[in-house]
Amino acid sequence: MVTCSKCGADPERVKTFDRTASMSGSIMGDEHIESLYYCQACGVYTIEYYVDHFGGDETARTEGPIAKERGDELVKIISRCDRPWDKKCRCPAHVEYFDGGLD
């Protein structure tokens, strides 16, 4: 379960901490899913990086706190795609979000 990287709030118990946006992309055959969570109480984002490795195992880690301004920029990029869940999408938003590193 992802918790706020600043205050430790979790989305099941704290309604002011929730997933805001998510983007999926394929990089070297691995599916990368990045989910942004925003904590209204702290005013920061936490990012969960989930990777489904082509050759086997899955990994997940979180990073944060991410400044609201930077998190808002990432959410804005994601919102430009009508299929952010589609790891095969190559729209300008996907390319920008994954810094041109998609297969």
Image (spheres, helix red, strand yellow):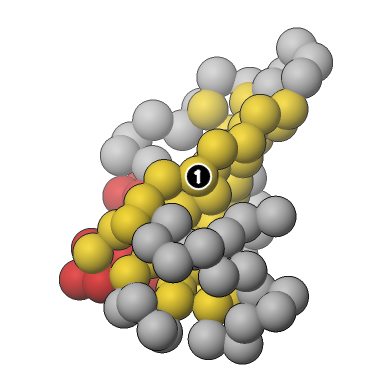
User: Does residue 82 sit above or below 60 in this rendering?
Assistant: below
Q: Residue furthest top?
A: 55
* Quarter occupied by residue 44: bottom left
- In front of the other: 102 or 14: 14
* Label 1 SS: strand
Left or right: residue 93 versus residue 89 is: left
- In front of the other: 55 or 1: 1
Label 1: how many Cα within 10 Å (few below 14, some 14–19, many 20+):
some
Q: Is residue 91 visible?
A: no
Q: Quadrant of the N terminus?
A: bottom right
On the image, the x and y values in percent for residue 10 come to 62, 69
User: Does residue 60 sit above or below 37 in this rendering?
Assistant: above
Q: Residue furthest right?
A: 56
- In front of the other: 88 or 17: 17
The residue at the point 75 percent across, 12 percent down is 55
The residue at the point 57 percent across, 60 percent down is 3
On the image, the x and y values in percent for residue 100 come to 33, 36
On the image, the x and y values in percent for residue 28 come to 55, 19
Residue, disc 1: 62
Q: Is residue 2 visible?
A: yes
User: Does residue 103 sit above or below 9 in this rendering?
Assistant: above
Left or right: residue 99 versus residue 102 is: left
The residue at the point 36 percent across, 51 percent down is 64
* Quarter occupied by residue 54: top right
User: Does residue 95 sit above or below 80 in this rendering?
Assistant: above
- In front of the other: 43 or 92: 43
Q: Amino acid at mark 1?
A: Thr
Q: Residue furthest front?
A: 7
Left or right: residue 47 versus residue 99 is: right
